[in-house]
Image (cartoon, helix red, strand yellow):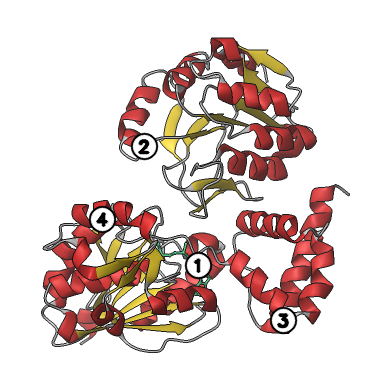
């Protein structure tokens, strides 16, 4: 049996290109759900889905509340809501205060995903100009999950991967393409 | 047993204790948020485990108030989701105008932002004199803020922008006066809203409503509780009345479809049917 059951990823500034590059590496044989928190403006949403859908054969959609998380699907958190995962592997949303000045916050998703999936979770931190995701990645590591960080020198905005690396001794530090290929092996 | 499993037991016990001691039932709230709020509370109060919270909660009513405050997420804003308010003006107000008098319920009103937005909207649409707004929440601290109608000045820019996108007839600055670092809503608006404590989980229907807003409240409930509260809201609505949910919430009635028409699916505005399916034939 495969060990991993879900992948969570977070990105901020520069994330659009990074996620597209990563998605392009995922073939139709990718059998994990990939759940993404990306800091966006409200208006960017619609365009984003078209852009991502054009880079992958996987189904890309906005995560909606109470929805069952299915393998081989790519979910993106809706703008202005925190995205959490319940123990029955469905999504829930929250409008509580911003975390690290962000809603959705990567930390919020990562922490609740770590509670649910534990050692069967892989977490990915990509480009960004803040430090959201660092504490969440640490939580994933503490719960026995796998941690992947984009190599900061290759990130359009290196601050987010750097902060993550200061917080966590990551299992893999790779380019986005390499991360995509690595996820295919899980 | 993992620390997560242990924590789950502690949380079950804590929620049970809160329910039996204070009558507030959070047992059917969506777990992930409850866990998050409890961990934040632990951090703030310097307590090591959820289990240790239990005796404190049982013996210190003041501490329960803190928990209540931590559990109820009172984040809101004026004219939040301006498109929704625009749709209300365009699609719902014309029908509301056909009634001599309307009752409106904002369920889960937090600090009152949504209720004031609605009061402004009804006033601009000429409905103020023919309507009453009830705005309810479980959080007394939030209700106290709502009654005062005082909000931080730094929010005004966002509120004004939202207001402008909602299809307004006037300017937002007409509805408050600013002093120091806050704004105070006009007395006239305050008078048009009745703020009261009401718990959707345990209290009953209190009036027949023409319009109900219950936005971003049931996202914190598990499926069963959500269905139960939806039934409560439904039974408070007159036939032909309107129910509005948050823009990321869905209306999936457990009690069967065919009872509601979608007025604006994107903005989650629904209308209770005047006749239920099949009813016309039996008459
Ligand atoms: C996120 S706020 C929503 C505010 C506003 N409706 C909006 O959408 O901006 C959720 C509110 O629901 C209230 N709430 C939670 N449980 C409730 C219950 N059982 N009955 C009534 N209100 C409740 C909370 O106290 C909080 O103020």
> CA gap, disc 4 to disc 2?
18 Å
* Residue placed under numbered mark 3 in the picture: B61
Placement of B6 over or under B16, stated as above or below: above
Which of the chains bears the disc numbered 1?
B
Which disc, if any, is residue B226? Answer: 1
* Residue placed under numbered mark 4 in the picture: B160
> CA gap, disc 2 to disc 1?
29 Å
Instruction: Give percent across and percent down for residue A165.
Output: 69, 23
On screen, residue A178 versus residue B162, left or right, reads right
Which of the chains bears the disc numbered 4?
B
Instruction: Give percent across and percent down for residue B142.
Output: 49, 73
> CA gap, disc 3 to disc 1?
28 Å
Placement of B85 over or under A10, stated as above or below: below
Determine if marks 2 and 3 fall on one subunit: no
> Which residue is at the front of the view, B38 or A119?
B38
Which disc, if any, is residue A41? Answer: 2
Marks 3 and 4, the one that precedes in the sequence = 3
Circle 3 crowding by C-alpha within 10 Å: few under 14, some 14–19, many from 20: few
| Residue at the farthest front position | B180
């Amino acid at each position: 049996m495969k060990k991993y059951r879900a992948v969570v990823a977070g990105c901020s500034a520069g994330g659009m290109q990074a996620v597209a590059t990563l998605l392009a590496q995922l073939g139709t044989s990718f059998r994990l759900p990939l759940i993404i928190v990306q800091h966006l403006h409200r208006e960017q949403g619609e365009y984003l889905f078209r852009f991502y859908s054009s880079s992958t054969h996987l189904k890309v959609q906005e995560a909606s509340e109470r929805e069952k998380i299915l393998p081989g699907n790519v979910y993106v958190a809706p703008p202005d809501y925190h995205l959490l995962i319940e123990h029955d592997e469905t999504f829930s949303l929250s409008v509580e205060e911003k975390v690290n000045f962000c809603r959705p916050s990567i930390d919020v998703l990562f922490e609740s995903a770590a509670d649910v999936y534990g050692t069967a979770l892989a977490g990915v931190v990509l480009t960004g100009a803040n430090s959201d995701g660092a504490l969440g990645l640490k939580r994933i590591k503490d719960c026995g999950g796998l941690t992947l960080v984009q190599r900061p020198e290759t990130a359009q905005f290196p601050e987010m991967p750097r902060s993550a690396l200061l917080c966590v001794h990551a299992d893999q530090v790779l380019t986005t393409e390499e991360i995509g290929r690595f996820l295919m092996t899980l | 047993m993992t620390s997560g499993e242990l924590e789950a037991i502690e949380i079950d016990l804590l929620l049970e204790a809160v329910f039996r001691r204070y009558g507030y039932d959070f047992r059917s709230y969506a777990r992930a948020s409850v866990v998050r709020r409890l961990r934040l509370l632990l951090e703030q109060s310097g307590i090591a485990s959820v289990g240790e919270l239990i005796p404190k909660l049982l013996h210190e009513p003041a501490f329960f108030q803190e928990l209540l405050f931590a559990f109820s997420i009172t984040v809101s804003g004026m004219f939040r989701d301006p498109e929704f308010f625009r749709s209300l003006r365009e699609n719902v107000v014309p029908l509301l105008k056909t009634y001599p008098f309307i009752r409106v319920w904002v369920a889960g009103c937090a600090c009152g932002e949504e209720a004031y937005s609605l009061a402004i909207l009804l006033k601009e649409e000429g409905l103020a004199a023919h309507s009453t707004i009830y705005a309810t929440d479980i959080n007394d601290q939030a209700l106290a803020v709502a009654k005062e109608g005082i909000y931080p000045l730094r929010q005004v820019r966002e509120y004004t922008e939202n207001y402008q996108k909602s299809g307004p007839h006037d300017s937002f600055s007409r509805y408050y006066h600013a002093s120091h670092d806050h704004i105070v809503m006009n007395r006239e608006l305050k008078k048009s809203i009745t703020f009261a404590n009401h718990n959707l989980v345990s209290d009953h229907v209190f009036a027949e409503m023409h319009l109900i807003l219950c936005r971003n409240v049931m996202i914190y409930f598990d499926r069963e509780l959500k269905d139960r509260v939806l039934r409560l809201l439904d039974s408070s609505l007159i036939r032909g009345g309107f129910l509005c949910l948050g823009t990321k919430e869905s209306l999936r009635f457990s009690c069967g479809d065919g009872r509601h028409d979608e007025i604006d699916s994107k903005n989650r505005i629904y209308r209770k049917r005047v006749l239920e399916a099949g009813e016309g034939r039996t008459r």
